[in-house]
Amino acid sequence: MDKPLLTIVIPVYNRCAIVGRTLDSIGAQTCRDFRLILVDNGSTDGTPDELRRRAAAMPVETVVLEEGRSGAAAARQCGLDAVGTEWTMFFDSDDTMEPRHVERALEAVRRHPDVEVVGWDVNRHCGGRSFRYVFTTCDVMFRSLFNGTMGTQRYFARTEIFRRAGGWNPSLGVWDDIELGARIIALRPKMLKLCGPVTVDMYDQPDSLTRGESLSNLPAIERALSSISATIGPKGPLWTGLKLIILAALADTDEARALRDSTAARMPKRYRLLMRAAYAYTARGGRGIARILRPLL
């Protein structure tokens, strides 16, 4: 048989009870021109045995690996190191894909042989509500920082692009996907958006460590933003400063207001009042301040 065109990589940590939903959706794909790598990240709830059992029953070649370093980024990098196909798709063990997801993705790269990154909209289900997250190829660096365009489940890319960008950063506990996405965008790859029906559903879990935006994760958030800022370049401190101020406003505590003041103080004077206005607008329940301020940034 010809070598598959695609590898799907999924990090898994303590998902014994729910990973089956994800794997069922992958096993139901109408196109099977892919292999699957599952990376157990030190699970303690029986997940390794469940993964091996599921792997044996999958209709595509499936490999189970183990990564001792904690964190999704380390597990994803372990999977990336084992990829031998032209394209790589990262996915999460909480989420599902519709049966034609892989088919439509691979159809796109066959129609557009020069494309390097292909993205799509996703539905995110959180707290009984659902939101459509839009992938865009316009102003993509800004949109990825503020709207998560390069979130893990929202695109796939040539394996060479992931590796040329430097791969995953295991030192980051949050936003490792947005940080890698910034490095990919900085390479200026040819990008394509798939239009049509949404074929990926994200389901938030209380212990989804990579999806939290709580200020309790402030040191990890600041490490990620520092790396993203360096990748963005001259606009980096301004954009990531605004991102931090928006997160602080969502908490709106004494600690958050102190963070607002210290962050704004590092800005050029002409932006300080703007940052305080962004905080006030968001703290009062306003949304979309980054989009509103984009022409000024």
Image (cartoon, rainbow, N blue to C red):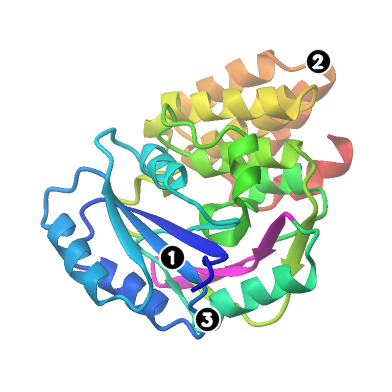
Q: Which quarter of the picture shows residue 202?
A: bottom left
The magenta segment: 116-134
Q: Which residue is mark 2?
A: 269
Distance from label 3 to label 2 (Cα)? 55 Å
Could you tell me residue 153's position as x and y percent? 52, 60
Label 3, secondary structure: give it. Answer: loop
Residue at x 60% of width, y 58% of height: 156
Q: From the viewer's perspective, is residue 174 above or below residue 45?
A: above
Res 134 seen here: no
**Callout in the foreground (1, 2):** 1
Q: From the viewer's perspective, is residue 109 above or below residue 30?
A: above
Q: From the viewer's perspective, is residue 120 above or below residue 287?
A: below
Distance from label 1 to label 3 (Cα)? 11 Å
Kind of residue sitting beneath label 2: Lys
Residue 154 within the magenta-colored segment of the rendering: no
In the picture, measured across the screen, residue 149 lies left or right of residue 205, that is: right
Residue at x 51% of width, y 25% of height: 222
Q: Main secondary structure of the magenta part?
A: strand
Could you say which disc has been placed on residue 31 in the image? 3
**Callout in the foreground (3, 2):** 3
Could you say which disc has been placed on residue 35 in the image? 1
